[in-house]
Image: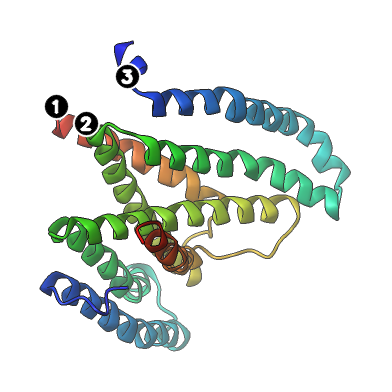
């Protein structure tokens, strides 16, 4: 979406996404290993559980920052519409799945899946939004 | 009152709320009261899916109606405040569910159902909207 961005703000956001993606896997594996081998409890357990989420949350902060500083109104508007599309899609899926869990005994979906679902819908929204401005 | 007359997008949303969301809400409430019996009977198969969809339809209809309202809203300020509120809403919701999901993954807290995501988002969005309204007062 922003791979072709020449603006420093866009480049910074793309860099944050790549670094975050690179950090998540080792942190998740590290946290899982720490829980498995050290049987963490108390504050230490919470700190280690937070670690894999930090790169993910960093992307959200960078997204907010990007939206705040982006000067190209058109690009900003497109991204906002994609994020709103992602929001709508995520809320629809979580609501439908939640009721299916409740009534139809659908498999339990962990909350950690909400974040990937959101980005999936943002990506799906992008071509739809672009088509509107063609 | 004059605000309503000047805002057809809001009028349409109010109409949709009255004629689509309210009947769906009544159906849902009916199902909730009847639900005691429903749960007692443990229906399965297609009926379970129909009940789940009937409940979910209210949330999905709300999303669609509000999306159309945002698209049609002509008042730039009102639209900008809503968009900012929604962005804060989704940002904070994703933060909370990701953190909670991670804690639940390592059995530090009880896992929450997916159904909590929508109310959490609504709560944060409403708080963000109030804060933004205060800021722009």
Q: CB under 8 Å between callouts 2 and 3?
A: no
Left or right: residue B41 compared with residue B36: right
The disc numbered 3 marks a residue on which chain?
B
Name which of mark 3 and mark 1 comes first in the sequence.
3
- Identify which residue is drawn at 26% across, 83% down: A19
Give residue B32's quadrant in the image: top right
Residue B137 got which mark? 1
Q: CB under 8 Å between callouts 2 and 1?
A: yes
The disc numbered 2 marks a residue on which chain?
B
Q: Secondary structure at mark 2?
A: helix
Q: Nearer the viewer, residue A13 or B7?
A: B7
The disc numbered 1 marks a residue on which chain?
B
Residue A122 % position (x, y): 41, 64
Q: Is residue B103 visible?
A: no
Q: Nearer the viewer, residue A133 or B68?
A: A133
- Identify which residue is drawn at 31% across, 58% down: A78
Q: Secondary structure at mark 3?
A: helix
What whole-number distance in Å separates the C-alpha atoms at marks 2 and 1?
6 Å
Residue at label 2? B133
Residue B6 got which mark? 3
Name which of mark 2 and mark 3 comes first in the sequence.
3
Residue A54 % position (x, y): 29, 72
Residue B136 % position (x, y): 14, 32
Say above or below: B96 vs B104: above
Residue A89 % position (x, y): 50, 56
What whole-number distance in Å separates the C-alpha atoms at marks 2 and 3?
20 Å
Disc 3 versus disc 1: nearer the observer: 3
Residue at the farthest top position = B1
Q: Secondary structure at mark 1?
A: loop
The lab-note entry on whether marks 2 and 1 share a chain reads: yes
Give residue B25's quadrant in the image: top right
């Amino acid at each position: 979406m922003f791979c072709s961005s020449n603006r420093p703000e866009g480049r910074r956001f793309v860099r944050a996404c790549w670094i975050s993606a690179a950090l998540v896997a080792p942190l998740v594996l590290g946290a899982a290993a720490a829980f498995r081998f050290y049987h963490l409890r108390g504050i230490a357990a919470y700190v280690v559980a937070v670690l894999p989420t930090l790169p993910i949350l960093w992307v959200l902060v960078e997204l907010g920052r990007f939206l705040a500083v982006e000067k190209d109104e058109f690009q900003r508007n497109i991204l906002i519409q994609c994020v709103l599309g992602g929001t709508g899609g995520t809320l629809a899926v979580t609501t439908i799945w939640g009721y299916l869990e409740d009534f139809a005994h659908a498999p339990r979906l962990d909350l950690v899946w909400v974040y990937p679902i959101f980005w999936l819908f943002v990506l799906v929204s992008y071509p739809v939004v672009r088509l509107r401005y063609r | 009152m004059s605000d309503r007359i000047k805002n057809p997008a809001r009028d349409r949303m109010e109409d949709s709320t009255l004629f689509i969301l309210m009947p769906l809400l009544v159906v849902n409430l009916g199902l909730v009261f009847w639900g005691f019996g429903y749960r007692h009977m443990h229906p399965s198969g297609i009926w379970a899916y129909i009940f789940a969809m009937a409940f979910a339809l209210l949330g999905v209809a709300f999303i669609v109606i509000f999306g159309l309202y945002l698209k049609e809203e002509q008042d730039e300020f009102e639209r900008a405040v809503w968009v900012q509120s929604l962005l804060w809403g989704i940002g904070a919701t994703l933060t909370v569910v990701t953190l909670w999901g991670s804690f639940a993954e390592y059995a530090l807290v009880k896992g929450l159902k997916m159904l909590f995501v929508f109310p959490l988002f609504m709560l944060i969005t409403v708080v963000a909207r109030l804060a933004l309204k205060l800021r722009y007062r």
